[in-house]
Image (cartoon, rainbow, N blue to C red):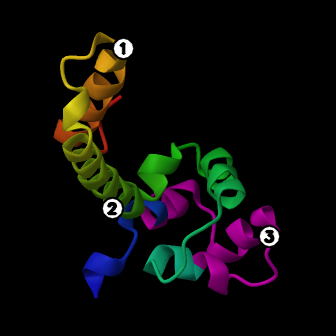
Amino acid sequence: MPDRINVQFRTLRRASGLVQEDIAFLLGFKAASTVSRFEQRSHEPDIRTALACEHILGAPVRTLFEPVYAEVGRLVQTRARQRLDSLTALVGDARHAARLAHLARLAEQPPTLFKV
C-alpha cells in the first residue's frame, strides 16, 4: 500500500546516505526493523524518538512524519469545532473572547505541512 509509506522520512533518510541500521543505532534500537516500521507507518515513534529523528535527519518532526502530522491536525480541527459548538453560551462574553477566537482559528485552518 504506497499511501501507507512515510515517503518524507524514507526520502530524507536515503538522501542522508544513512541506511536503516544506522538510524536504528543512532536511536538506540537493536534492530533496523523499527526504522522500517516508521517508514511503513505500522509504528509511530514516541516524542523522544521523533525529536532524535529530527536531529539525525535535519528536518522538522512534522516533515519527517507528515502523514501523522496531517492526521493529528484533522483530529484537532474536528475537536475544536466540537468544542466551539459546546461553548455557544460564551459568545459575546469578553472574558472568553481570546479562548473562542483561538478555537475558531483551530477549527478553520486546514492541516498543512508548509504552514509556519
Q: Is residue 33 magenta?
A: yes
| Amino acid identity at mark 2 | Glu
Residue at the top extreme? 94
Say which amino acid is labelled 1: Arg
Which mark, by number, is residue 95?
A: 1
Query: Residue 25, which numbered label?
Result: 3
Q: Which mark is residue 71?
A: 2
Q: Quadrant of residue 74?
A: bottom left
Q: Position of residue 77 (x, y in %)?
A: 26, 48
In the displayed structure, would residue 24 be above or below residue 65? below
Q: Check if residue 106 falls in the magenta segment.
A: no
Q: Is residue 62 visible?
A: yes
Q: How many marks?
A: 3
Q: Whole-Å distance between the Cαs marked 3 and 1?
A: 51 Å
- Label 2 crowd bin: few (<14), some (14–19), many (20+), radius 10 Å: few
For the point 45% across and 48% down, the residue is 62
